[in-house]
């Protein structure tokens, strides 16, 4: 059982329950200002050896229906990657691969692709739709840390850091599997964006009765948002791990109120 007074970013015992939402509580760290909820996903998400699939026609149609909207963003992400290196013949790892669309785009661009997706239903979709075999082991697993140390030219982490149990560990583990000179590309919602701050202000002004957007930004359900970074916190984290930051895109206003980072392992 994790003690949520221990900050998931700076590891001091300075985190306190700060925003009590309907289904979860947001802890804020007095030392570093990190915000995270009092919930962790149980991993692994499936019993080993349980091969029963929940990918029925309804689930298939739902996932397939999401592809066009996701594809629009992921093609932009692919363009960003291609601006920094040639993908042909490169070794790529997509962490949090979902339905496998980005892994598919990488493969189309000539890359040799691995992908991590803890949810079996998405792995099965990726296999049947794109012929891509995603792995269920998370990046901290020995499968990657021992089998692929210093291996990848590119690691991508699109919309994942806000979902994982321990984002600092996810980034450290990603660092280990990137080869010297290799690239990390990621995006994640930006917590110091305007709408989040309006939610905090409304929560305080209403004595907790009206948290506005905060309610929709966090959820204790599996694989939903558990934490959000400010730009400064994320930059400090990646630099403390050893990455050099090559490029930062960010905005405080919707619809681009997220952080996009391009980093390199020296
Ligand atoms: Zn902290």
Image (tube, grey):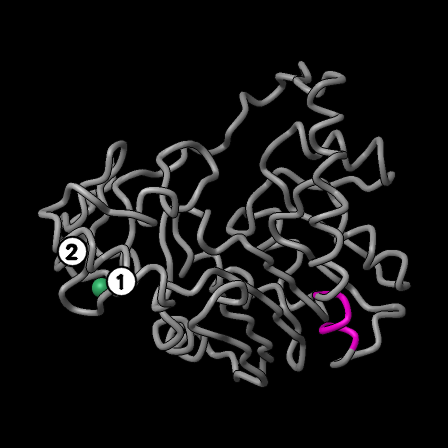
> Taking 64 as reference, is 242 above or below it?
below
Quadrant in which ligand 1 is drawn: bottom left
The residue at 43%/80% (across/down) is 239
- Is 241 left, or right, of 135 in this rendering? left
Corner quadrant of residue 233: bottom left
Counting from the top left corner in percent of width and height, residue 122 is at 68, 33
Q: Earlier in the sequence, mark 2 or mark 1?
A: 2
Q: Are marks 2 and 1 in contact (CB under 8 Å)?
A: yes
The total number of labels drawn is: 2
Q: Name the mark on residue 15.
A: 2
The magenta stretch spans residue 79: yes
The residue at 38%/47% (across/down) is 217
Assess mark 2: CB under 8 A from ligand 1? yes
What span is colored magenta in the figure?
Answer: 77-82
Instruction: Tell me the SS state at disc 1.
Output: loop
Counting from the top left corner in percent of width and height, residue 254 is at 49, 64
């Amino acid at each position: 059982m994790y003690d949520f007074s221990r900050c998931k970013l700076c590891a001091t015992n300075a985190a306190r329950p700060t925003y009590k939402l309907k289904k979860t509580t947001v802890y804020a760290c007095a030392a570093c200002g990190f915000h995270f909820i009092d919930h962790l996903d149980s991993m692994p998400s499936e019993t080993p050896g349980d091969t029963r699939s929940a990918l029925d026609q309804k689930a298939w149609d739902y996932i397939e229906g999401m592809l066009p909207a996701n594809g629009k963003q992921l093609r932009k992400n692919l363009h960003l990657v291609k601006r920094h290196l040639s993908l042909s013949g490169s070794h790529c790892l997509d962490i949090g691969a979902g339905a496998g669309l980005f892994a598919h785009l990488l493969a189309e661009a000539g890359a040799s692709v691995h992908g991590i997706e803890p949810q079996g239903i998405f792995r099965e979709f990726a296999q049947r739709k794109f012929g891509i075999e995603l792995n269920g082991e998370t990046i901290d697993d020995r499968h990657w840390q021992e089998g692929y140390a210093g291996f990848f030219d590119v690691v991508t982490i699109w919309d994942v850091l806000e979902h994982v149990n321990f984002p600092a560990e996810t980034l450290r583990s990603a660092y280990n599997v990137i080869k010297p000179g290799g690239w990390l590309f990621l995006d994640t919602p930006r917590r110091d964006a305007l709408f989040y701050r309006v939610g905090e202000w409304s929560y305080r002004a209403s004595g907790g009765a009206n948290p506005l957007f905060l309610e929709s930004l966090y959820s204790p359900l599996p694989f939903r948002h558990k934490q959000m970074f400010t730009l400064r916190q994320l930059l400090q984290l990646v630099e403390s791990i050893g990455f050099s930051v090559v490029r930062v895109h960010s905005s405080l206003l919707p619809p681009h109120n997220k952080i996009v980072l391009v980093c390199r392992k020296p």
